[in-house]
Amino acid sequence: MNDSALITVGLPIALAIIMFGLGLSLTVGDFQRVARSPKAVVVALVLQVLVLPFVAFGLVVAFDVDPLLAVGVMLLAASPGGTTANLFSHLFHGDVALNVTLTAINSVLAAVSIPVITNLAIGYFDAEGELGLQLGKVVQVIAIVLVPVAIGMVVRSRSESFAARADKPVRIFSIVVLVAVSIGAIVGERENIADYVEQVGLVVTLFCLASLTIGYLGARVMRLDERQAIASSMEVGIHNTTVAMTIALSVLDNTEVAIPSAVYSIVMYVLAALFGWAISRRVRGGAAAEPLPGERAVR
């Protein structure tokens, strides 16, 4: 699977299209909004960029996960929040504007966080002989993650009508790619998949539950309101697994590293829906949160 032109060429191009579509949904105002709500943004980013990697590291060490799978879990932890977080936040009455802002910033930070955390994991779990993320590959990560987003934002600034027309096709394309890559990664390792799921299935499930919970409780502890806490939970808990799998398959050239993200891509939607439902039930028992001023509709 790893030597296929579909993986080495087609998958990075597909991800670039997805990230271009993400750029089409963002504006400079999404970054400027940080100044108007700095505390909520900083809290969520600290939880996602700094806390989650330590949680993931603790889990893979505690469960003595195979080195390549452990690197895959760390790569997953370093990946940015998925754009689907906006939808889940909207469904469960979160602050969607905060999600949009976090998605924008995360897309930039991922170009740095992914190479740094992945390289640290490769070194710690002694996987240098099988993996490598040297300077050339770091540049490749930046090229397929950050550059298309920037281009998409430029295109949107010049033609909002085109950005609006492209939104639905790109979202559908994103889902198709995610499903195809997840199935491909699992099929590519079908002889070992039972062992992999046994090793990493529980770890990935616990990581997802921890991500959702930390995103919500961390925000509440820092005195963010209910809607901001829901937005933080969904942003921290729902990862862009397409990014993680693309890097595992086309940059690191290893299917086993992609398995944790493939499993997570299935688990996260189920757990995020259940988590959001549980929070909604609790909130309905008290006073409903008032809409935040200036919240934009989910895109």
Image: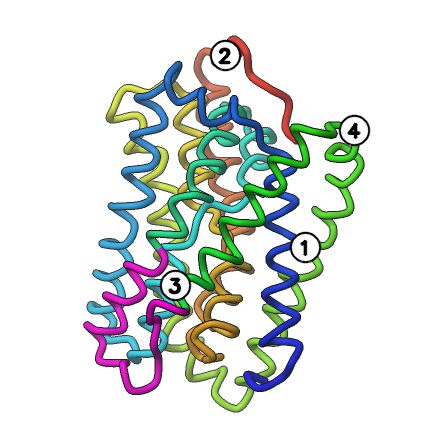
**Residue tagged by mark 1?**
175
Per the rendered image, the range of residues in magenta is: 114-136
The chosen color scheme is: rainbow
Alpha-carbon span between mark 3 and mark 4: 34 Å
Disc 4 secondary structure class: helix
The residue shown at (22%, 54%) is 54
Three-letter code for the amino acid on which mark 3 is drawn: Val
| Magenta stretch contains residue 283 | no
Element type at mark 2:
loop
Structural distance between the alpha carbons of marks 3 and 1: 26 Å
Q: Earlier in the sequence, mark 3 or mark 2?
A: 3
| Occupied quadrant, residue 216 | top left
Q: Earlier in the sequence, mark 1 or mark 2?
A: 1
Q: Along the polypeptide, which appears first: circle 4 or circle 1?
A: 4
Q: Which residue is mark 4?
A: 161
Q: Quarter holding the N terminus?
A: bottom right
View extreme (bottom): residue: 191
* Whole-percent x, y for residue 63 in the image: 25, 71
Residue 129 position in % (x across, y down): 29, 87
Residue that numbered label 3 is attached to: 138
The dot on residue 213 is: none
